[in-house]
Image (cartoon, grey):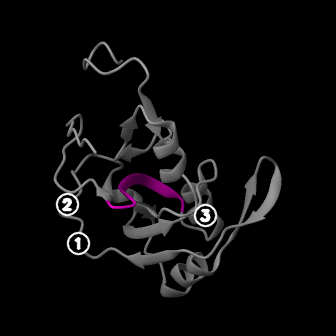
Amino acid sequence: MSELFNLPKAIMAVGRLDEKSEGLLLLTTDGMFSNYMTSQNIEKEYHVMVDGIITTDKISALTKGVKISVNGNAYVTKPCEAKLLPDTSHIIKRFVRDIKHGPTSWLSITLTEGKYRQVRKMTAAIGYPTLRLVRVRIGNYKLEKLKPKDIEAIHY
């Protein structure tokens, strides 16, 4: 990949996105920066489309922490921010499923931890499976108006 974009050979991704997720991905050659940005000191914000019309009590459950499985063990997620996302005009439209399969809701979920497929597991735990997951922020770095495959270089 580094040859394709003329990037340094020591380039690494800051955090991970699973194959079904999309959104902001930071690249760096600085291992300390990568470690810090993936630490529990830094917020990661996701915009999440779930199956069904989510209720305020289920959103509240997310904010308090829900029980999920991590490496085969029960784990209660740390408290997080979760809220209904009324405006999704910033998210690029793409087909997920036909409207005849029922309504969907969009949430903003902000975490400081990052267990494997955590957001998907959290929404499933409250009865609202994730249909689409877009990471929009890592700390102060925001996706904002970048489109898929756009690259913006930030040097510090």
CB atoms at circles 3 and 1 under 8 Å apart? no
Cα distance, mark 3 to mark 2?
A: 24 Å
Q: List the residue tagged with mark 1.
A: 87
Q: Is residue 7 visible?
A: yes
Can you name the residue that lies furthest to the top here? 3
108 w.r.t. 10: above or below: below
Residue identifier under label 2: 90
Q: Is residue 15 visible?
A: no
Q: Measuring 44% from the left and 22% from the top, which residue is drawn there?
A: 10
Q: CA distance from mark 2 to mark 1?
A: 8 Å
70 with respect to 100 (left or right): right
Label 1 residue SS = loop
Q: Secondary structure at mark 2?
A: loop
Left or right of 103, for residue 72: right
* Magenta-span inclusion, residue 137: yes
Crowd rating for badge 3 (residues with CA inside 10 Å; few <14, some 14–19, many 20+): many
Q: Residue at x 27, y 15 (%)?
A: 4
Residue pictured at 67% horizontal, 68% vertical = 77
Q: How many marks?
A: 3
| Vertical side of 53 occupied by 121: above or below | above
Q: What's the amino acid at mark 3?
A: Met
What is the magenta segment's predominant secondary structure? Answer: strand
Which numbered tag is attached to residue 48?
none
Quarter holding the N terminus?
top left
Quadrant showing the C terminus: top left
The answer to whether marks 2 and 1 mark residues whose Cβ atoms lie closer than 8 Å is yes
Secondary structure beneath disc 3? helix
In front of the other: 106 or 139: 139
Residue linked to disc 3? 122
Q: Position of residue 83 (x, y in %)?
A: 42, 78
Magenta stretch? 129-140
